[in-house]
Amino acid sequence: MLPLQIQPESRIPIYAQLRDQLRALVRIGQLAPGDRIPPSRELAARLGVHRTTVANAYAELESEGLIRGHVGRGTFICGQPNGAAGANGASANHAASPAPASPAISPAKTNGAIRWDGLFAEERAEETLDRLLPTSARNAISFTIARPPENLFPLDDFRRCCNAVLRHRGREILQQGQTDGYPALREVLGEWLRTDGIVGPQDHILITDGCQQGLDLLARVFLRPGDTVLLENPTYPGALAAFSSRHVRAIGATVRPDAGVDLEAIGYALERNRVKLIVLMPDFQNPTGTTLSLLDRRRILELAERYRVPIVEDHIYAHLRVSGQPIPSLKALDRAGIVIQIDSLSKLAFPGLRVGWCIAPEAVIERLRLAKQAADLHTSQLSQACAAEFIRRGLLAKHLDRMRGVYRSRLEATIEALERSMPEEIHWSTPEGGMCVWVTLPPGLDAVELLVRARERGVIFAPGRLFFLDHAQPNTLRLGFAELNERRIARGVRILGELATEQCRRSRRGRSSRNGDLRAVTLV
Amino acid sequence: MLPLQIQPESRIPIYAQLRDQLRALVRIGQLAPGDRIPPSRELAARLGVHRTTVANAYAELESEGLIRGHVGRGTFICGQPNGAAGANGASANHAASPAPASPAISPAKTNGAIRWDGLFAEERAEETLDRLLPTSARNAISFTIARPPENLFPLDDFRRCCNAVLRHRGREILQQGQTDGYPALREVLGEWLRTDGIVGPQDHILITDGCQQGLDLLARVFLRPGDTVLLENPTYPGALAAFSSRHVRAIGATVRPDAGVDLEAIGYALERNRVKLIVLMPDFQNPTGTTLSLLDRRRILELAERYRVPIVEDHIYAHLRVSGQPIPSLKALDRAGIVIQIDSLSKLAFPGLRVGWCIAPEAVIERLRLAKQAADLHTSQLSQACAAEFIRRGLLAKHLDRMRGVYRSRLEATIEALERSMPEEIHWSTPEGGMCVWVTLPPGLDAVELLVRARERGVIFAPGRLFFLDHAQPNTLRLGFAELNERRIARGVRILGELATEQCRRSRRGRSSRNGDLRAVTLV
């Protein structure tokens, strides 16, 4: 019998676990060409998973050329996986749309001279989110990603900015620059954020390659291997990646439906662990879309002060409020100087530029500058100079005004469609901004199974389990609405509603028949 | 008496050690406003350093407003250092020209609420090269940096490329991209480097933010805290920074004058240590300018294969050969698939773009891709797309042709000027390309003292000690010639020659008078 082990609590969907384990068995020789593997129905029954899950894993392995079905005879191993990326390397077939697998310059084959597997620092590489996210055919309605729609980029404005800076400051921009950032960008950001009360008199700015690098540099500056960081659970998976690559222990504080991170969970974690850093996203949290109240913000600042633990405030969605009253950021409320804010252009305008920033007291920025110098010397000055000019001309403010209107309408369309289409057992967050709505299916249902069916009907989304550090809730999913227009949102959610309704009905039936002997009366 | 400790072997110049220690004493309260500090002559005698060294430290502290001299009374502490960056924070006054200190958004003062010092992972931050490098007045002849001269950037060509890619692929470029790089760039690089025999059939490419990020990602992928990496000694200080930030142990193999890294030192290091990675720069090594012979390259590959240790080949200067026969790169000679090559545009054309790349077998690139995703998601697509178009149109090849001519003439001017101006006790490397010449003063002389005098006459360079992991040779210095025209090279080296001649003469006198009692006869 095949040694397959399913971990239902893992961030990795079950079908991907199956696929990866079968691929690994071929690679280590435990399955050889010609071997027969069990029919999907049989394997599904044995593992206690849905048959579609197994079928999905098989379909991907078949598209890789690893297995082949023969009518009337069964399914057989027929070769080595494409490429030589080790057991964890995903082939091009299941790469996500934003990041397809690196195409080989020429067909890749191992020459056998050196085996790299034993030479890496980590025995096993974790799959990254971009590879785990579902892909689909070209015209799928994709709620997968949270990013600005490229068809609304103000391209002409941008090109004019780019031309102007190259014409007037070209030599300076293309020459090596300062580690803490292009001065003109730090200046316009400072002006903008000072009027927002974010930048205080003690603060300096460091430009980063987006928030991801902000997290990575903070991990480098504040945490030694084995130290503990406190994250929200669920959270942005890139945060987890940044900290785990530093051999840091990440613990999670639960995010409450519609109320942001749980204060008691934070207090509990701080009391029982020597936490070195807290990372929070108080506004339109990714993935839940929830926002922390003013009172909670003040209480969290008190906790951080009491335990002397710096807070990293991920501010990346905060500018995208579309309804309700603005709440001051942790950075603006901070009196002890204990908050470090990271932010980025990536959700506001042009993710491809990789321009973000960190705002913190000078002593922190100085350490981050040293870390940044060791990491990559500095951020692209072409990106920085264009961003600076775009902000200086008031074009970012104008673009943001427009996009808030767009996102308001799309968020409303999402909520309306959910209200219209979803059975009453299903719940969702009601964000006042950002790019995501968090949907919770009844306990016992699995969003990956919903995804497998939805994909067949041309709709995809991110299963919630990908965002959990631990205690994953398989019955959750994230809908990123920013890239879809209202018509596609309505259609996509309607299809999800139909499938979810069916899934709920099946689950009730299954439960009533399983529990029939015991509680037949109550369940009828 | 003040508790000042000078470490002559340190990478940090003596005057900077003094400056930093005095600043720290003020900060911790051991020196208070009104306290008198010893006259420079007295302190110099006590510490056994040159008086100019002490005077230089005092001058910087005075410009920071920390001390003040009163005629006839002496020098007194008069305040706290500017800024609140901790004892290691350099003030704006002695920042290097390429990276002046972050100017405060508003005047920085500690508010006393939280002390950051105890919260960082490292108690003490090492100063970075850009802060250690000497600065000077505007029109100084600076041999400090190794980078392309911005006045020869083909700006119009670049702007046309930028316009074209924004016009035709703007939405794609400004949207989030793939972690392993913008496809068009990987493609043109692949074509270019395949014809050079560098990219083999097993190889993939990952785009990085320059070579610095290549080193950082490799450290992440191959080394766990406590592991050992083998570097050249002296080497590029950024390599040391990348590895030390991972808590990795770096050991050095000596670089021979004019012959590249010592094979025996490598063999010895591999035999006695469990080395996980070797980092080499076989062509025009930074800082020495030396090149490894073909025979040595083959022997190093054999060693690496025998010990199964991957080699990172830093190829950043290799395209800049201006005389002699080209020698195949380690990557091109590699049969075991054990070489990972890192390279960059930064020495060829536009350092400000931060575009570099890694070439390696697919299994390695896959791990680097995961590391890159945790580090910053991807490199600026605007930078990448412009670079791709610049290469695709043949403009990089054209620019390189031109620049090789420029560098040939500048290198020859440097060597000629050295031959003309330097006393015979002084030696230097004779590179066949790259951007640096390595100069060795007679043993016992200190390049930092030469620098202090040279700066007064408007000439600056990088003291050799900054490039050593250990066993620093204080009598060495690096002359970066790429940014200076022939006239300024001749004048700068003439001034260095005058000062070095004087220094040698003084040293001979000093030695003969110091050793007079014992060996008067032999020394006369």
Image (cartoon, coloured by chain):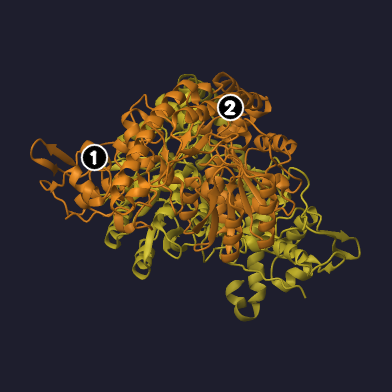
Chain colours: A yellow, B orange
Q: Amino acid at mark 2?
A: Arg
Q: Is residue B59 above or below residue A494?
A: above
Residue B84 image point, x, y percent:
26, 46
Disc 1 packing (10 Å; few <14; some 14–19; many ≥20): some
Q: The residue under label 1 is which amino acid type?
A: Ala
Residue furthest out toward the right: A72
The residue that label 1 is drawn on is B55
Q: Is residue A164 visible?
A: yes
Q: Chain of mark 2?
A: B
Q: Secondary structure at mark 2?
A: helix
Q: Nearer the viewer, residue B206 or B92?
A: B92
Could you tell me how far apart the alpha carbons at marks 1 and 2 are, in whole angstroms? 39 Å
Residue A506 to residue B38: above or below:
below
Task: Pinpoint residue B164: horizontal percent, then vertical percent.
Answer: 62, 23
Near-viewer residue (A468 or A392): A392
> In the image, what residue occupies the spot 59% across and 20% down?
B157
Front-lying residue, B126 or B500? B500
| Residue under numbered circle 2 | B408
Q: How many marks?
A: 2
The residue under the point 31% across, 51% down is B515
Chain containing mark 1? B
The percent position of residue A272, horizontal first and vertical second, equals 36, 70
Q: As drawn, which residue projects farthest toward the left?
A: B72
Q: Mark 1 touching mark 2, by CB under 8 A?
A: no
Q: Is residue A129 visible?
A: no
Q: Earlier in the sequence, mark 1 or mark 2?
A: 1
Residue at 75%, 52% in the rendered image: B335
Q: Quadrant of the N terminus of chain B?
A: bottom left
In the picture, measured across the screen, residue A361 lies left or right of residue A393, that is left
Q: Residues within 10 Å of mark 2 (few under 14, many from 20)?
A: many
